Amino acid sequence: MPPEDLSLRMGRRRFVAAASAALSSLILLPGCSFGVMFNRMILGDPKVPAEFRNMTKIDLTKGEHTVMVICSTPAAVDDDLSTLKLDLIDGITRRMKLNGVEVIDPDHVATWLDDHGGFRDPSELAEDFDVHFIAWIDVQQFSFREDNSPKLLRGRCAGFVRVYRVDPSGDNGFKFTSNVYESEFSSTYPRLQPLSETGRSGVLFRKEYVGRVCDHLAEKFYDHRPGGDF
């Protein structure tokens, strides 16, 4: 037998042996469904359905609707974290785009908000953008330091996600918006005990925590893998 044929046969035998060993270990696991474990091994964990789709029956990943993300924060938060609104708009929008949702460029949204000094009602933005839904991230609380212990780091964020459908058939040609989805959110990270700033800088921790908040809020709009500590 040629050396290359022998090598190929040996490789196949090793693969079959490894696969058999893996399947045997799954079968022997107590209290475990073999079918579930096998599917997870091959396909990974099943995705969690998007909360927005569950409530509205609209799948935003089909490319039939365009979404704009906007954000508001309390004045006290703005004083300490002036870029938080834009960081959340940018982070959430980009995660949605990566997962198949058609979105309005966050830079265009940031420019509009800067030119108009913010917004009071989502319908204000509807007049100037060709969009089907406006997702309003209404942050009520945000901090990344432990109360009364500024050297300890713990992220806290709470608020509401409100989504408005834009209807172009309003009176006198104006668009109007109607609320189609609302969800409250609350986060504490880490849950068990705060982190010391001597172990990592407050700037890096804040960036990491904002990223976690963006992950969680963006996942409301597309199917995603389970997990995350929020």
Image (cartoon, rainbow, N blue to C red):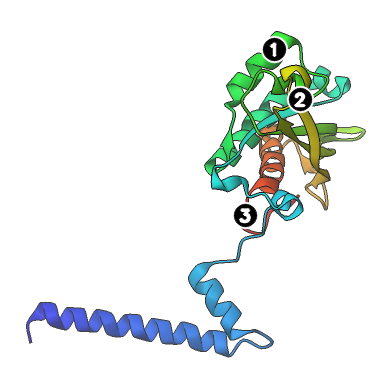
Query: What residue lies at 62% left-to-right and 54% top-to-bottom?
Result: 223
Q: Is residue 199 visible?
A: no
Q: Secondary structure at mark 2?
A: loop
Badge 3: residue crowd in 10 Å (few <14, some 14–19, many ≥20): some
Q: Is residue 166 left or right of residue 104?
A: right
Hey, which residue is sitting farthest right in the picture?
A: 148
For mark 3, what is the residue? 224
Between the residue at mark 2 and the residue at mark 3, the CA separation in whole angstroms equals: 35 Å
Q: Which circle's residue, 3 or 1, is located before the other in the chain?
A: 1
Q: Secondary structure at mark 1?
A: helix
Q: Is residue 10 left or right of residue 209?
A: left
**For the N terminus, which image quadrant?**
bottom left
Hey, which residue is sitting farthest front in the picture?
A: 172
Q: Secondary structure at mark 3?
A: loop
Hey, which residue is sitting farthest top in the picture?
A: 115
> Based on the displayed image, in which of its 4 quarters is residue 60 positioned?
top right
Amino acid type, residue under disc 1 in the picture = Asp
Q: Is residue 188 left or right of residue 127?
A: right
Q: Is residue 56 left or right of residue 111?
A: right
Amino acid type, residue under disc 2 in the picture = Gly
Amino acid type, residue under disc 3 in the picture = His
Q: Which circle's residue, 2 or 3, is located before the other in the chain?
A: 2
For mark 2, what is the residue? 170
**How far across and how far down the image is residue 211, in percent?**
66, 38
Observer-nearest of 190 and 121: 121
For mark 1, what is the residue? 114
Relative to 213, is 83 above or below?
above
Between the residue at mark 3 and the residue at mark 1, the CA separation in whole angstroms equals: 33 Å
**How far across and how far down the image is residue 104, in percent?**
59, 28
Badge 2: residue crowd in 10 Å (few <14, some 14–19, many ≥20): few
**How far across and how far down the image is residue 172, in percent?**
76, 17
Q: Disc 2, disc 3: CB below 8 Å?
A: no
